[in-house]
Amino acid sequence: MLGMLVLLISVHSGAASGQGNEAVWPTTHWQNSTPEEQGMDSAALARLVAFGTTRSFDSLLVTRHGRVVLDAYYAPFTADMPHTINSATKAVVATLTAMAYKDGLLDRLDHPMLDFFADRRVAEGDERKKAVTVQHLLDMTSGLDWDEGFEGGREQSMRDMGASPDWVKFILDRRMAHAPGESFYYNSGGSHLLSAIISKLTGKNTADYANERLFGPLGIAPPFWRRDPQRLPIGGFGLAMRPRDMAKLGYLYLRNGEWDGKQLLPADFLEAVGHATINMNARSDPALRYANQFWAIPGKHVYMAVGYHCQVIMVLPEKDIVAVMTARDFCPLGRLADDISGAVKADSVLPANPAAAGRLAEVIAEVSTEKATKVGAAPAIAAAISGKTYKFSDNALGIKSLVLFLTDENPRYIVQMAAGDPAQRQLDGPIGLDGLYRKSAPSFLGIRAAKGSWQNEQTFIFDFQYVGLGETSIWTLTFDGNKATLRGRARYGREATAEGTSGG
């Protein structure tokens, strides 16, 4: 890590400046530069890195003129770890749709959706559903009835889809709530239909097509991609990528769909993304617009691939910037766009600023180094509960049972989840009791990290996360005899409680 800091912050010979006109192609690796060499202010970027600590960032990367000027990783996340990008997966699926269109596999973007599912008997097949097109799916204006929790809904459609044995059938069978094109409503189901359409158009698994036509040319190793019950890569979420590879996707758009002399994306698709006009009706930010599975803030000249909890690939064409954020909390997209733009002070090289560069290096080193949190003294009850299995009634947290081995030489935990793949429902690993995380062996979801502390003589705080999954679970366990009350936050921040008992 220290070597990377020196490389990024020091003035190195041979680094091209923002004055050059020739595009840099990071197919094999990104070139590094100091911010000042690319007309950016190290002090402003240092403040941006510090701000990331207030929003539980896992990483923050900024490129300008095709070179990395900021590359920060927040402990316990590290540069070599893939990060789940959640709904930013939608932008990847949209990109593949555009590539199939450019390649002539899809004749037009307004092709009727149901044409691709003629082999299925579709329920609620009225004239409005017959009018739904690929473009409607891309723009989330299909009119299919859907509740995903966007702007405070209940996520019922996502839960029902997850319980369905056939996700594509579940989505196609939804009733029509609106005429196609009438209104925007956030719908990951439509994105999953795009994955199914790509598979039908190409005769290949969506991931295989992506590896061949997109990830391979960009120099991205095949990433992990979750599948539905039919083994179709999920169109609305499920990809895990390293931040530097996420930045390559943004750079493809920044360079107008070109990569190293080859045009990969069609002009009309890119035009729609760069000038998004669909009103998202977002109370959180009325300035947001949408097009082709990308978010945009036209007033700030920025468009983005956005995933739950601030998994963001941000493109600022006028500043020649791609920025990537991964996090475990929501983030203010408009403010981040302003702060990144504000760090640009010139299109040409700025004078070296050793003091600001040194401060940036310090801040990056600070966030990349894990710091011990406060832990209380272990009370007598720690020995009494250690090794006991606490079984919980049905709860929104999805926890079935919990065992804490707190007095062993190597403290550890076993958590049994109530749902999901039966082979993956048991989570176990070491737990740090000294204020520092202990990491598990890698799993298909990544590396688990856990630590615990005593709040008082009866209350234990269990801090658990999949590093790179984009979420942290902090459970408060209160013990009373053979009873345990567990409190935590379910998805979208809702408080949840579970009551458990041990055998004695």
Image (cartoon, grey):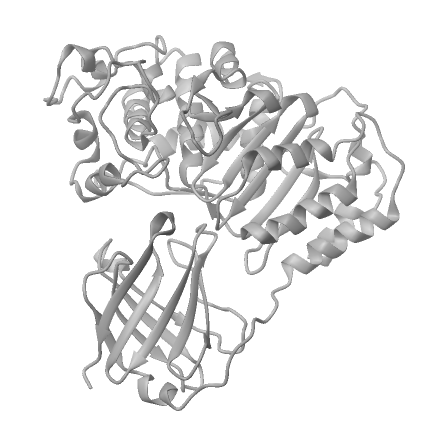
Answer left or right for 408 relative to 335.
left
Residue 227 drawn above or below residue 18: below
Q: Residue at (15%, 26%) from the top-left corner?
A: 173
Q: Looking at the picture, tell me which residue is in the foreground, 245 or 61.
A: 61
Answer left or right for 348 relative to 51.
right
Q: Looking at the picture, tell me which residue is in the foreground, 117 or 276.
A: 276
Q: Is residue 212 among the parts visible in the rendering?
A: yes
Would you identify the image quadrant in which residue 203 lies?
top left
Quarter containing the C terminus:
bottom left
Q: Is residue 80 among the parts visible in the rendering?
A: no
Answer left or right for 312 relative to 204.
right
Q: Residue at (55%, 19%) from the top-left corner?
A: 257
Would you identify the image quadrant in which residue 462 lies?
bottom left
Would you identify the image quadrant in which residue 101 lies?
top left
Residue 346 drawn above or below residue 10: above
Q: Looking at the picture, tell me which residue is in the foreground, 403 or 425.
A: 403
Residue 456 drawn above or below residue 465: below
Q: How many badges with numbers are in the image? A: 0
Q: Looking at the picture, tell me which residue is in the foreground, 428 or 232.
A: 428
Furthest toward the bottom, the residue is: 380
Image x and y of residue 347, in percent? 79, 25
Furthest toward the right, the residue is: 351
Image x and y of residue 441, in percent? 43, 65
Image x and y of residue 45, in percent? 72, 43
